[in-house]
Amino acid sequence: MTVVCPHPLLPTMPDPRIEHLEDFTAHEWCNALIFDPSITRVHKRHVFGKGDEWNSLFTRSLFTNDAIRAFLNLYKPGKGQRRAVDRNSIVTGEPPKFRNVAPSDYDKELRRRTAKEDVQHDLTDPEAPENTVLVSMGGELDGGIGRLHGGVTASLLDQAMGALLMHYYESSNATTELRVKYLKAVETPCILKVRARISREVGRWIETAGWVEDGEGTVYAEGWGSFVLAKLEPSAKM
């Protein structure tokens, strides 16, 4: 009889992924953030079929009970926009979908990006657009014992910044530079919030700032990123 051994890198049984949102709702500061009416879109990780998903680092590789146990993306569009808060429902929307640009909007957006006007954004403006990633971290992402790996901190900043641009510009984007200043070690397990704001835009070139915090006043890291938005294609008119 021939015994076939499973490949060590392939799963041998189903691996259900569950967002442990109770990790968040057990904390008042998390609830205050989740149910903030100025945050109009709250969504979990959107898991696609294997091989068809984007951002598999967060939606698959780190989606375990001992790595990133729970994940919520919270987008605040600013400019006075608000939502009616439903305390019975945490999730208020799906991840952003890239827009199908109408001809007139396409021409306007194309002119704006081509002009490369240097626009500075006020990071202290309370009504500025902001994206927050809320994560519950287990102990399998450590560098030192009981301390979060610095590379994970950088990845969280990159994730929050890129998601902000996807929401705000409704466009895919690519990171061109990321700088991180580490201020304090992150002890695990923990719950973190990672905020991102736009600081500057020049055509398709976007600069951002971000912060890794605990929701109670501690700032663990600051980051600065540069991104380039995807080119608008003529097919977007269709």
Image (spheres, rainbow, N blue to C red):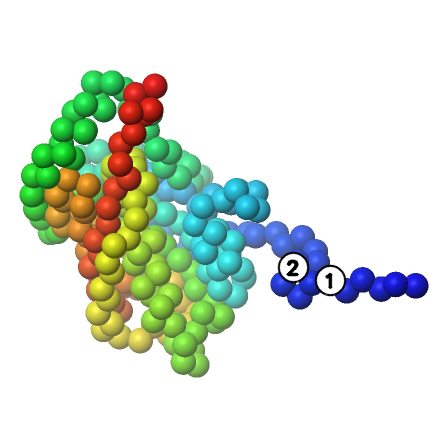
SS at circle 2? loop
Tell me the distance, in whole angstroms, between the alpha carbons under discs 1 and 2: 7 Å
**Mark 1 near mark 2, Cβ–Cβ under 8 Å?**
yes
Q: Considering depth in this image, is 85 or 47 the residue closer to the camera?
A: 47
The quarter of the displayed image where residue 85 is located:
top left
Kindly identify which residue carries mark 1: 6
Image mark count: 2
Coordinates of residue 11 in the picture (x, y in percent): 66, 58
What residue is at 19 percent from the left and 41 percent from the top? 204
The N terminus sits in image quarter? bottom right
Coordinates of residue 35 in the picture (x, y in percent): 33, 44
Whether 25 is drawn above or below 189: the answer is above
Lateral position of residue 68 relative to residue 183, left or right: right
The type of residue carrying mark 2 is Leu
Kindly identify which residue carries mark 2: 10
Q: Is residue 151 visible?
A: yes
What residue is at 23 percent from the left and 58 percent from the top? 177
Q: Residues within 10 Å of mark 2 (few under 14, many from 20)?
A: few
What residue is at 52 percent from the left and 54 percent from the top? 60
Coordinates of residue 27 in the picture (x, y in percent): 38, 58
Whether 30 is drawn above or below 111: the answer is below
Whether 187 is drawn above or below 202: the answer is below
